Image: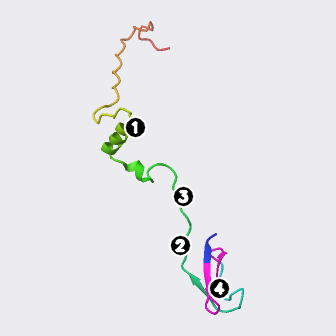
Amino acid sequence: MPTYEYECLKCGHRFEIFQKMTDTPRKRCPKCRGKLRRLVGSGAGMIFKGSGFYVTDYRSQSYKDQKKKESGAPPKAKDESKPKAEPKAKSKPGSDGSHGKSV
């Protein structure tokens, strides 16, 4: 449920109320029964979960290398990649003892 903020036009009393979006806005101040004005609120707080929401998630490679250098860890080379797996040799029919027959 959203939080709505109200201000009394008569006495200046400000307060917040949790209301459904479908509820009718309050019209009278709970203190002096004066007319209310609903204020524009800042809205709800947002929670970002996962990667990609923090400035450190988008650091450049040179920045990361510099940080590793300062911490004493060896920097990662840009062209360094994982070793590629060698393709498996095709087996000839009969090399596994089945003589090409399927069971």
Q: Is residue 61 above or below residue 76?
A: below
Q: Quick one: label 1, few (<14), some, or many (20+) residues within 10 Å?
A: few
Name the residue type under label 1: Ser
The tag on residue 71 is 1
Disc nearest the viewer among 4 and 3: 4
Mark 1 or 2, nearer chain start: 2
Name the residue type under label 3: Ile
Mark 4 or 2, nearer chain start: 4
Give the labeled residue for mark 2. Answer: 42
Name the residue type under label 2: Ser
Q: Is residue 26 above or below residue 71?
A: below
Q: Residue at x 62, y 73 (%)?
A: 3
- For numbered disc 4, what is the local secondary structure? loop
Alpha-carbon distance for marks 4 and 1? 55 Å
Alpha-carbon distance for marks 1 and 3? 31 Å
Residue 73 is a magenta residue: no
Q: Residue at x 50, y 49 (%)?
A: 50
Mark 4 or 1, nearer chain start: 4
Give the side of residue 33 with respect to residue 38, left or right. right
The tag on residue 13 is 4
Give the side of residue 93 with respect to residue 31, left or right. left
Disc nearest the viewer among 4 and 1: 1
Q: What are the residue bounds of the magenta stretch?
A: 5-22
Residue 15 is a magenta residue: yes
Alpha-carbon distance for marks 4 and 2? 19 Å
Give the side of residue 70 with respect to residue 22, left or right. left
Q: Residue at x 34, y 37 (%)?
A: 69
Mark 1 or 3, nearer chain start: 3
> Viewer-proximal residue, 39 or 96?
39
Give the labeled residue for mark 3. Answer: 47
